[in-house]
Image (spheres, helix red, strand yellow):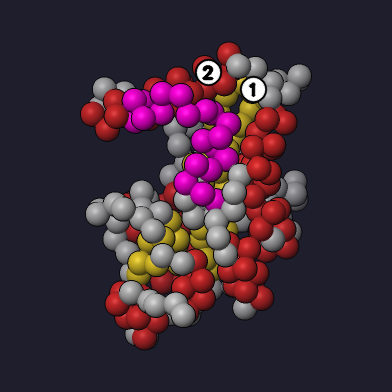
Amino acid sequence: MLSLSADAHALAGKEHHEVKAVVFDQDGVLVGRRGAWERIRGPNGSAQLYRLLRKGVLDLSEVRDIYEAGMRERGTCREDFIKAAREAELEKHAQEVVKELYDKGKKLFIVTLAPSIFARVIAERLHPEAFLRQNASAWQVPMNVHGNIALFDSRGLFVSVVSYPTGARQPWEFRGEINKRLVLDGIRERHGWHTEELLYVCDGYDTEVSRYYPTVGYRHTSGTLHTVAEITDLRELLRLV
């Protein structure tokens, strides 16, 4: 039998706008902590790089440049990305929860800092109708899967990653990371929803989003995340939505 935290009970019991959409982080929530992006860029030096990042010796763009240089040197190609996403271990109960939320009529989104080529494969594995076959644009771009954009050359070899801060394809490229709060803002505005009608699920690192949107922390360890509920089993989401 599942047990809900006190915060989760409070969320389930209080009056609030009905949740119309659930927005999932990818790595650490829908797939294991060593998600598809970690699998493709390789573990070598990760701990050391992130120590330097936390100390301010390197910034995020410099860390990404180091990873990308290694991927180009190894001859990483498009198929390597797809293979890694196909082999990534889905989080326990992720498929079950996604299916039930979809059957309840909830809109579902994936927002990730990993390249969207990963997220689309993960979405296909979880539930293609829920994630990939709704709200498509005239160019058949899945509008409910948002990530950074991996670029490949004519031979299919990896070149670089570019980012659009809002998660949508702007007429300019931004050399940084997508801003998840801006992505959620765009989702909310496009559908005409209230802030409280979106529920964000992450593993504890998206502190900016959690200041503006109701956020559920899934097995997270960060003390700075502002959550409305803490869960250790994805099935607990079904009692909150």
- Residue 16 in view in this figure: no
From the top left corner, tell me how far across and down residue 170 is, in percent.
57, 39
Q: Is residue 178 part of the magenta span, yes or no?
A: no
Q: Amino acid at mark 1?
A: Thr
The disc label shown at residue 19, or none? none
Q: Residue furthest top?
A: 73
State the SS at label 1: loop
Specify the quadrant of the image occupied by residue 158: top right
- Residue 96 in view in this figure: yes
Residue at coordinates 64% horizontally, 50% vertically from top-left?
122
Vertical arrangement, residue 98 with respect to residue 207, above or below:
below
From the top left corner, tell me how far across and down residue 165 is, in percent.
48, 41
Q: Which comes sooner in the sequence, label 1 or label 2? A: 2
Marks 1/2: CA–CA distance: 9 Å
From the top left corner, tell me how far across and down residue 9 is, in percent.
35, 81
Specify the quadrant of the image occupied by residue 72: top right
Residue at coordinates 25% horizontally, 27% vertically from top-left?
56
The disc label shown at residue 70, or none? 2
State the SS at label 2: helix
Left or right side of 190 for 180: left
Count every numbered label the image shows and give the total.
Answer: 2
Closer to the camera in the image, 233 or 240: 233
Residue under numbered circle 1:
76
Left or right side of 65 for 103: right
Q: Neighbour class for label 1 at 10 Å: few (<14), some, many (≥20)?
A: some
Left or right side of 80 for 192: left
Q: Is residue 43 part of the magenta span, yes or no?
A: yes
Vertical arrangement, residue 196 with respect to residue 30, above or below:
below
Q: Amino acid at mark 2?
A: Gly
Q: Which residues are magenta?
A: 31-50
Residue at coordinates 53% horizontally, 43% vertically from top-left?
35
